[in-house]
Image: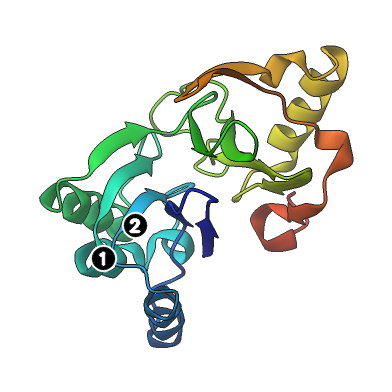
Amino acid sequence: CTIVEFPGGETLMIDGGDGSAAAQRAVLGWSAALGIESYDSILLTHPDSDHAGGLEEVITLFGAETVFLPQFLQGSTAAEKFAAAAERAGAKMRTSRIYEYILSGSEESYAYMLFLAPMYLQEQGGSSNDSSAVVYLEYAGRRMLLTGDASAAVEEKLILDYAVTEGEVFRFEAEAEWGTVSLAPRLEELDFLKMGHHGSSGS
């Protein structure tokens, strides 16, 4: 579980832990300690229960304006319960895919999160890890990549496409309150990397 506080005050939760009692205490307790009354966005990177397990309680207790979900919940009980609770809470439901973004702050000092994956919508029954959301965050020159449970194959494709196009593949023109902003992730100059699939040998 990762909680992001943007410079404009917006809050984002990425994944929610495995739903165990200890994880629930940490996730809900930390949210309360930060003074969060309602989340602006919640992102479930993929439907595995160790990422979706705690989100039903989070959305029920805190709510969210927008929820980003994987294309398929693939029979994951935890993910399906979260999606149902999000609908009951009245959240806007979005499908995670490349070029979705969150933009916050002002023209002089803004932060953004940009989806780099999944790059393509997949057929039902594909690997949930291969369809995991991969997101890039940047603020004040600091850069962070969170890879969910993306596999080595996904990571290698991201790197190859980035290298071949010199980064242009992920450049995106976003609309901000002050005008159009060019979002241009720089993967070769990361400050922070959340290792893929918990640092497993498959990533």
Colouring convention used in this rendered image of the protein: rainbow
Q: Quadrant of residue 177?
A: top left
Identify whether 66 is placed above or below 177.
below
Q: Which residue is more in the foreground, 186 or 140?
A: 140
Note whether residue 15 is visible: yes
Badge 1 element: helix
Q: Which residue is more in the foreground, 145 or 39?
A: 39
Residue 151 in the image, given as x and y percentages of width and height: 68, 43
Residue 187 in the image, given as x and y percentages of width and height: 81, 35
Identify whether 160 is placed above or below 50.
above
Which residue appears at 56% of the width and 44% of the height?
Answer: 129
Identify whether 128 is placed above or below 36.
above
Task: Report crowding for label 1: few under 14, some 14 to 19, many 20 or more residues within 10 A (C-alpha).
Answer: some
Residue 25 in the image, given as x and y percentages of width and height: 40, 85
Q: Is residue 157 left or right of residue 25?
A: right
Q: Which residue is mark 1?
A: 62
Q: Is residue 2 left or right of residue 189?
A: left
Residue type indicated by callout 2: Tyr
Q: CA distance from mark 1 to mark 2?
A: 6 Å
Badge 2 element: strand
Q: Which residue is mark 2?
A: 39
How many numbered marks does the figure carry? Answer: 2
Q: Which mark is residue 197?
A: none
Which residue appears at 22% of the width and 57% of the height?
Answer: 81
**Mark 1 and mark 2 residues within 8 Å of each other at the beta carbon:** yes
Note whether residue 73 is visible: no
Which residue appears at 22% of the width and 45% of the height?
Answer: 91
Q: Which residue is more in the foreground, 112 or 180?
A: 180
Identify whether 60 is placed above or below 136.
below
Disc nearer the start of the sequence (1/2) = 2
Task: Report crowding for label 2: few under 14, some 14 to 19, many 20 or more residues within 10 A (C-alpha).
Answer: many
